[in-house]
Image (cartoon, rainbow, N blue to C red):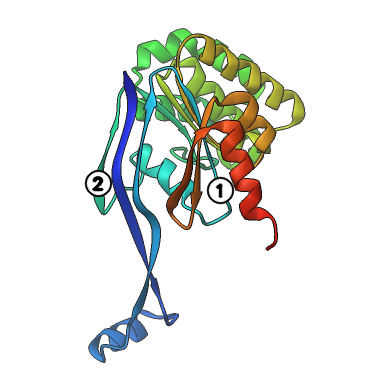
Amino acid sequence: MAAITVDKVTKKFKIPHEKRTTLFKNLLGIIRRQLTYEELLALGEVSFEVERGESFGIIGRNGSGKSTLLKILARVLYPDSGTVVVKGRVAPFLELGVGFQLELSAQENVYLYASILGIGHKQVDKKYDEIFEFAELKKFENMKLKNFSSGMVLRLAFSTAVQVDPDVLLIDEVLAVGDEAFQKKCAVKIDEFKERGKTIIFVSHALDSVKKTCRRSLLLDQGRIIALDDTRKVIARYIEILEPK
């Protein structure tokens, strides 16, 4: 049974040709009809399915559409056309601090982030100590997040999401930001999720990690699918693209 179904998803962005630094200049440009845009195709009719319990890789060069696709799966962005169905509770690791408020304490942010994931206050109460123990941030629970390092924010986000038991994990390279010891803890936790039949979408430039984690992978280039197959075959195709002609 499919946990994720993506059908002919297309997403375009408009890039202004001229940089306008003031509201007056923007209004003047509109009046004169001089404000023109270039259309960038981020994703072009992308279709695939991910089975429940599958670990699925997405690879490609910078600008190929990987992060855009993950944001659409996380419902941060919406496609211009096509459909996306994701079944179950989703924990997205897209960018550091997404969903967090820097002026709130770590404790307050745990409850806030959990609510975004659809987790109630009572359930967080039961997992609260485990969240801070896993993140190794117990003594910082009352500190405002604006005083945290990027690595500390990552640890808090990851620990909160995994303790509230999501059905689908969307991971976009962010785990590479943590220190080596925490990366190992994350890898162990991800392996536990795999063993428990959770669905994982893993975007990374670390091809060895993709090979270790994912049986199947998808290769994107300029917003379009180039390969969708066994991970080893897809990585081999990717290396062909990267090699100078």
- The amino acid type of the residue labelled 1 equals Gly
Residue 34 makes an appearance in the image: yes
Residue 38 coordinates in the image, percent (x, y): 38, 74
Label of residue 140 in the image: none
Q: Secondary structure under badge 2? A: strand
> Closest to the observer: 55 or 18?
55
Residue, x 43% and y 82% (percent of image)? 18
Residue farthest along the bottom direction in this orientation: 32
Q: Which residue is drawn at 57% across and 27% down?
A: 156
Q: Mark 1 points at which residue?
A: 60
In the image, 111: left or right of 129? left
For mark 2, what is the residue? Answer: 82
What whole-number distance in Å separates the C-alpha atoms at marks 1 and 2?
Answer: 21 Å
Three-letter residue code for mark 2: Gly
Among numbered discs 1 and 2, the one appearing first in the sequence: 1
Residue placed furthest toward the right = 180
Quarter of the rendering occupied by the C terminus: bottom right
Q: Considering depth in this image, is 1 or 138 the residue closer to the camera?
A: 1
Rendered view: 131 above or below 11:
above
Q: In which quarter of the image is residue 30?
A: bottom left
